[in-house]
């Protein structure tokens, strides 16, 4: 028997960074994001040979252990090992024997929340196998704890909740790790127009988001005025974006994205660079009215709002800069599991 799972990646439309402590603890964060039809996949094959095999197919990395309660965290497939360690510690209370295979539709450091989506997918597969009762909130919180606490990986909270819930969500983040997920009911016409007008562009580069996130957190901790004011603006832009989408005032989306990009660059160094600025300015010169980096910044995916028919000119122009466009659809479902005999 095989236990399979998948969880969606996401694009962060507005408010990115306000889910990171200490800002979210002191001021409350608000983020608007949406999941897309790019996924993280996990497959568990239970075995009885007393072995644990971890295989990240997309990374071409495989490691094997004798079955044991805790696997060493040593820089090799630590996400996979950290999940297993927590599952044994909190739920099964005994070692397991299995083969775990994973694959993600986007490279690490892409800005689409791929690492957190993978954690959610693997946890969902373990929960299906071991009959662990986890709702969306419990699944996302456990994924957050494994990444941010057990493995000490810098980052925020939105990615785990996006992967667990799926769809368009306005998320609120407060002290004591309180999170409220507000699903948005968007008219189909508005969704279709957004899919037509939003272009997803991969710059061809990845980045280490933890360094940018650590700098953002440091700036907020030190109460640097420019960074703090920019965070406040990002939070308000998430609410503006929500209202524009729900009311069908889609022409304002590009303006909100452009405001958000300006604010985001003020939160920390390294969010933009010469290459990203060139791409952004080229898109605007061909008719895009706004855009941003998806994720912490520094590389990965960007997306642009291209009103009317400007998408075609923007595509032609950005093809010359060496990146590639990815077709996508918005999705409504979060993490899913199924069994194969």
Image: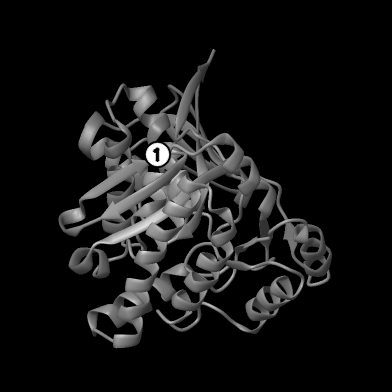
Question: Where 133 sits versus 217, above or below?
Answer: above
Name the residue: 31% across, 82% down: 219
Q: Is residue 211 above or below residue 313?
A: below
Residue 77 horizontal side relative to residue 154, left or right: right
Residue 116 lies left or right of residue 291; in this view the side is: left
Question: Horizontal and vertical percent for residue 298?
Answer: 55, 74
Q: In the picture provided, is 128 more to the left or to the right than 149? A: right
Write the residue at 26% across / 57% down: 149
Image quadrant where residue 67 sits: top left
The C terminus is located in which quarter? top right
Which of the 4 image quadrants contains residue 325?
bottom right
**Which of the two residues, 55 or 220, is positioned nearer the viewer here?**
220
Q: Position of residue 244 (x, y in %)?
A: 48, 54
Picture layout, residue 231 above or below residue 223: above
**Dot 1, crowdedness within 10 Å: few (<14), some or many (≥20)?**
many
Q: Position of residue 14 (x, y in %)?
A: 45, 61
Total numbered labels placed on residues in the image = 1
The way the protein has been coloured in the rendering is: one colour
**Front-most of residues 218 and 199:** 199
Q: Residue furthest top?
A: 341
- Mark 1 element type: helix
In the image: residue 48, left or right of residue 138: right
On the image, numbered disc 1 is attached to which residue? 164
Q: Residue furthest left?
A: 176
Residue 26: percent from the left, percent from the top?
18, 68
**Res 255 seen here:** yes
Residue located 35% across and 52% down the image: 72
């Amino acid at each position: 028997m095989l236990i399979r799972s998948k969880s969606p990646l996401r694009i962060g439309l507005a408010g990115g960074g306000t889910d990171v402590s200490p800002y979210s603890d002191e001021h409350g964060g608000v983020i608007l994001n949406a999941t897309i039809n790019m996924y993280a996949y996990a497959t568990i094959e239970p075995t009885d040979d007393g072995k644990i095999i971890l295989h990240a197919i997309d990374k071409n990395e495989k490691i094997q252990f004798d079955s044991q309660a805790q696997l060493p965290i040593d820089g090799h497939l630590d996400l996979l090992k950290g999940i297993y360690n927590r599952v044994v510690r909190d739920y099964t209370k005994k070692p397991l024997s299995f083969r775990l295979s994973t694959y993600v539709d986007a490279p690490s450091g892409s800005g689409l929340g791929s690492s957190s989506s993978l954690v959610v997918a693997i946890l969902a597969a373990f929960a299906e196998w071991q009959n662990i009762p986890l709702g969306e909130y419990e699944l996302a919180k456990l994924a957050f704890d494994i990444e941010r606490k057990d493995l000490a990986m810098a980052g925020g909270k939105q990615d785990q909740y996006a992967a667990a819930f799926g769809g368009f969500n306005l998320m609120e983040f407060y002290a004591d790790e309180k999170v409220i997920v507000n699903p948005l009911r968007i008219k189909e016409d508005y969704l279709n127009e957004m899919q037509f007008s939003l272009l997803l562009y991969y710059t061809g580069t990845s980045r280490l988001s933890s360094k940018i996130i650590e700098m953002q957190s440091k700036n907020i901790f030190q109460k640097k005025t420019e960074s703090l004011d920019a965070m406040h603006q990002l939070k308000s832009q998430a609410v503006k974006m929500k209202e524009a989408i729900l009311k069908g005032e889609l022409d304002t989306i590009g303006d909100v994205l452009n405001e958000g990009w300006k604010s985001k660059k003020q939160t920390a160094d390294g969010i933009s660079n010469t290459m990203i600025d060139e791409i952004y300015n080229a898109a605007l010169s061909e008719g895009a009215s706004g855009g941003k980096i998806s994720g912490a910044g520094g590389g990965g995916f960007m997306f642009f709002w291209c009103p009317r028919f400007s998408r075609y000119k923007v595509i032609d122009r950005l093809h010359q800069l060496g990146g590639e466009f990815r077709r996508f659809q918005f999705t409504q479902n979060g993490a899913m599991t199924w069994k194969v005999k």
